[in-house]
Image (cartoon, rainbow, N blue to C red):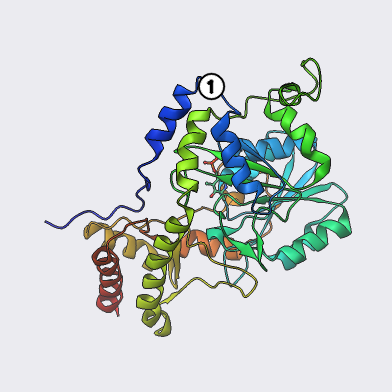
Amino acid sequence: MINHIPFNKPFLTGQEIQYIQDAVSSGKISGNGDFTKLCQNFFAQRGFGKCLLTTSCTDALEMAAILIEIQPGDEVIVPSYTFVSTANAFILRGAKIVFADSMKTNPNINADSIESLVTSKTKAIVPVHYAGIACDMDQIMGLAKKYNLFVVEDAAQSINSFYKGKPLGSIGHLATFSFHETKNIHCGEGGMLVVNDDRFKSRAEIIWEKGTNRSAFFKGEVDKYGWVDVGSSFLPSDMLAAFLFAQLERIDFIQSERKKVWDMYYSELKLLEDKGFITLPIVPNYASNNNHMFYMVCNKSYDRERLINHLKKNDINAVFHYISLHKSPYYQTKHDGRELTQSDLYSDNLIRLPLWVGMPEENIKRVVREVKNYYYQEF
Ligand SMILES: *Cc1c(COP(=O)(O)O)cnc(C)c1O
């Protein structure tokens, strides 16, 4: 019997339970405790602005939408090829989403297409660094400056990845990370808001703490605390932060293990690309690769379906990814009708291969062998 190869296996360092135990024993189990501070400092020391842990990246995006004061009727430019939360957070505040197409060379937003989408109602651009590979941030920040727009980086997949040497998540006015179990570093469900623009720093803390100035009170900055603004409960329990900190301590190991798997896939599958069957990921010169994901683009959508089925028959779980949001049941009637052909191409033809920390070499080889078997049987 051959073993099943899952798409993802959440990595555990072995230290998570001990740190949760420590958080429980400390008697401070709610949010903004010692482990929360350790996690936030970890990022603050690496070139980010103010960092606030949240219960998800979705929550961090919702905080971003509140902070930039999205009003009904405002327009927000978002790639169509992304996860629903990138758009939903702004829809919840009444924004109209203007979907942008992806690039020909990778699924990131086509920065060349953004300027023609800007109107007098545009308030923000939300680039998503797909697979942890940077969007063209100089171009996007340049447009934001020219038209006085905010940039919220959806850096959900981008931990430890860079644009021209700057960490992703440190460039936009605001940025959001995810620590969902499918991401490189995780705590089951979790996220973080990064506030790089000083104008938002104190208000971000208030929104985070249910609209109160509780954080300022505990830091001794005000003598009593009360309700000062809108807000919600965006803080995770310190038990989750304890789990997360155990992962952050091992970030270098985690990244190097992921890189081994990614590099092996790339070199073993290059031949299929050279023969013209598939396209492998392209990492632009300005970007680094945090090996969040190994994807490839099939030339034909029927190849994608058949390849997934072939792998499934061989006990390998490979998966497709996003369906263009402008064609979703929720948004198709609201979309302005523009064709977004690259986004559709990735919706139909992109496949992701299994990748996790500790994936045995023989598993990687088996996946490669079955991908090759599929193409050699077909042609
Ligand atoms: C995972 C992901 C999200 C959502 O993250 P959660 O922490 O599950 O809310 C948002 N955007 C992108 C691009 C993602 O990959």
> Which amino acid is tagged 1?
Lys
Which quarter of the rendering shows the C terminus? bottom left
Q: In this view, does 362 lie above or below 182?
A: below
Q: Can residue 330 be seen in this view?
A: no
In front of the other: 253 or 374: 253
Q: In which quarter of the image is residue 314?
A: bottom left
Quarter, ligand 1 = top right
The x and y percentages for residue 131 are 52, 59
Q: In this view, does 244 lie above or below 273?
A: above
Q: Is residue 148 above or below residue 307?
A: above
Q: Which element type, helix, strand or loop, lies under badge 1?
A: loop
Q: Which residue is drawn at 48% across and 48% down?
A: 249
In the picture, measured across the screen, residue 68 lies left or right of residue 362, that is: right
Q: Residues within 10 Å of mark 1 (few under 14, many from 20)?
A: some
Q: How many labels does the image show?
A: 1
In the picture, measured across the screen, residue 35 lies left or right of residue 317, that is: right
Q: In this view, does 281 lie above or below 199?
A: below
In the picture, measured across the screen, residue 352 lies left or right of residue 81, that is: left
In front of the other: 16 or 187: 16
In front of the other: 341 or 38: 38
Q: Which residue lies furthest to the left in this view?
A: 1
Q: Which residue is drawn at 37% across and 82% down?
A: 271
Q: Which residue is drawn at 71% across and 26% down?
A: 215
What residue would you read off at disc 1?
Answer: 28
